[in-house]
Image: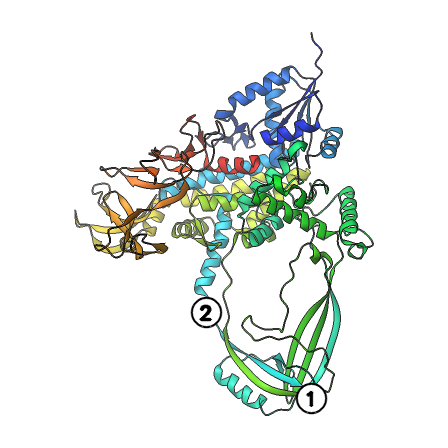
Amino acid sequence: MAKKEKSLIVVESPSKAKTINKYLGKEYVVEASFGHIKNLPKSQLGVDVDNGYEPTYETIKNKADVLKKLKQKAKNVKDIYIATDPDREGEAIAWHIAEELEPVNDNIYRVLFHEITQSGISDAMENRRKLDDKLMYSQQARRIMDRIVGYRVSPFVWKTIYYGLSAGRVQTVALRLICERAEEIEKFVPEEYWSIIGQFKPDSAEEFYAKLMRVDGKQKKIGSEKDAKAIVDEINEQQYKIANIQKKDVKRNPSPPFITSTLQQEAASRLRFSTKKTMTLAQRLYEGIELGDEGSVGLITYMRTDSVRVSNEAVAGARDFIYSNYGKEYLPKSPRQFKKAKSSQDAHEAIRPTSLANEPKKIKKYLEKDLFRLYELIWNRFIASQMEPAVYEQLTVEIEGGRFLFRASGSVIKFRGFLQVYDDVSGNGANGNDDDPTSPIPTNLSVGQDAKLLDVIQKQHFTKPPPPYTEASLVRELESKGIGRPSTYSLIISTILERKYVEQKDRQIHPTELGKEVNKLLVKYFPEIFNVRFTAQMEDELDTIATGKQSYKKVLDDFYYPFTESLEKVSKKTADIKKSMQEETGEKCDECGREMIIKWGRNGRFMACSGYPECKNTKPLAHEQEKLNEVVNDTKCEKCGGEMVVKGGPYGAFLGCSNYPECTNTKPITLGIKCPKCHEGEVLERKTKRKRTFYGCNRYPKCDFASWDKPVMQSCPSCDNPYIVEKYTQKKGQFLKCPECKNEFDPDEIAVANQESG
């Protein structure tokens, strides 16, 4: 028998395999599993709750060939190293791969590539270990919790609202937070208050503004114009002096390098990236980017982390870079240490560049625009984290007259420190509301100096409700409440967006009518399950499986029994619940004379006859009909310059000129999706003469692309066809399908695959 000299390394994605191949010698073969190879069955629960929550896994339909290839390679190698992502999900994938390969070769080891560099790979190979069953069981418990909720609660939602909806264990809690914030905004009653600003002119100094802070030594709330006017009249009668001047240096320390949540928040606020886009780009930076002759290089460390810890080697490199590029005055005497959060698992380093030789400006030509912007953000944050603090000179001046005290505060930067690299300095000036007048404070003031009152400005304000969540603020809220983990934030948000439970307007997240209805239903009938405290507690218990403090079965028991008790109670009342949720319209059915009620369907709410199924009469709600002739903003008629409005026709909605019949110009309404065939036009919804919906290119007849199913601009994970389509059947619900290879995919699996493969 020939001697087996090579070893097999299994990773998740082809791009990672390509980068790793570059650093390993010919004695290694690197293959990709393309993410998960096994999953719970789609057609059934797949969990034996009476036998220790034993799952039944199936090989994913389109992974049979991948698995066959891995088994063939495993037969002919000495050792197998499974190098899936270094987190719990990666451990679960590794476990499934090992299960399949063990019968043909049991020399299996686990290696963790925290960074895909020469040193990172060498360290990982030197520290190989056996698979960790505690990490695997922790991830499996999460998966089974989610499966039980999805399979047991979703049918309840179908029966009470409409078929095809779904409920998620963690996503529903995120939806609840969004709905509660929207309700808080809706119920908010603004309170009136007034600010009073004085303009003062000290002797031999420029005039400046100061805000009234105290009356008779106390803060005073001014709640009406009448009160404000009375105070202003009295203020005008006083003589004023500079009562106090305080000047001090204030240091502002840099933030730690990024963890997953802070990267998502900063990328959202600075770069306007969605959390999903941020993680997709970060995955690519981690797995490897082609840098010319250097080949594929992993540019950042692993991007799913909650730790601010950084290796001593990386800190030393950052300090050398700072000294060489900014000078010794920007370098602290000793390396900066950051305190880890109590909830941090601390499994990985913070997100940082893998090599300081790859300075952003040096490799910019190899990176797409958004990849470069994210890499530069990560780079700058890391370098800044090891720099000296910024130093401000803060000046506070108090002016007194009678029983009134005014105060002006401002600051001037003395030393930029870390701001030289990561400039997030906010504006300075007098304290107050955004619309209060401000001015620089003169520096040549002295205590006891007279200050002439030139003017008094009284301004009306109203308290404001909390703002709607953005992706950044929602991630911050989820993290602070212990909901989800670094690997799940992006998926939580993308899931509730894809299910149309929420929508984004001007980067703010608002619940849809459907989302409000689903949230109201689930929170009312499952208050113990879909609440923040219980969900955070479950996250903590999942951690105890990973650390060995609690058993897999005990944690699932803690979840399953209260959940089952709640489910049994509501299952007996499903028909009554459904009836209680139906809204009466006060209208009679045109066909049978019975009452019309409001129902939910896949296309939203509509009116239906209460006599269904004997009478199947339906009609749109009044506000849906009102959408016709609605003006479309920023869209003008190319022929006459008039407004374009929504029109209805036998083949669906379209845009028509508001100057009809003088101008007969029309324009189709597209879905905002690039045509997958010509890549120039956009896909629009059309109808046949028999009113059957299909999708085609708006450049027809130049482009003849057409599909009965709605295209999704996502390449097929199996055959790389440039698009897949949305499908729906009563039996399967909503799913995705490739029109080329005919493989079917769960929407949630596609979302996970996007994050894993970049």
Residue 125 falls in which quadrant of the image?
A: top right
User: Which numbered dot is residue 15?
Assistant: none
Query: Height in image: 399 above or below 574?
Result: below
Residues under labels 2 and 1: Cα distance? Answer: 43 Å
Q: Amino acid at mark 1?
A: Asp
166 with respect to 624 (left or right): right
Q: Amino acid at mark 2?
A: Val
Instruction: Tell me residue 672's x, y (percent).
Output: 40, 45
Relative depth, front residue between 97 and 120: 120
**Which residue sits furthest front?**
639
Please name the residue shown 40% across and 35% down the image: 678
Name the secondary structure under disc 2.
loop
The quadrant in which the N terminus is found is top right
Q: From the viewer's perspective, is 180 left or right of 654? A: right
Circle 1 sits on which residue? 450
- The image position of residue 60, as x and y in percent, is 50, 27
Residue lying farthest right? 333
Instruction: Judge whether residue 342 can be spotted in this image.
Output: no
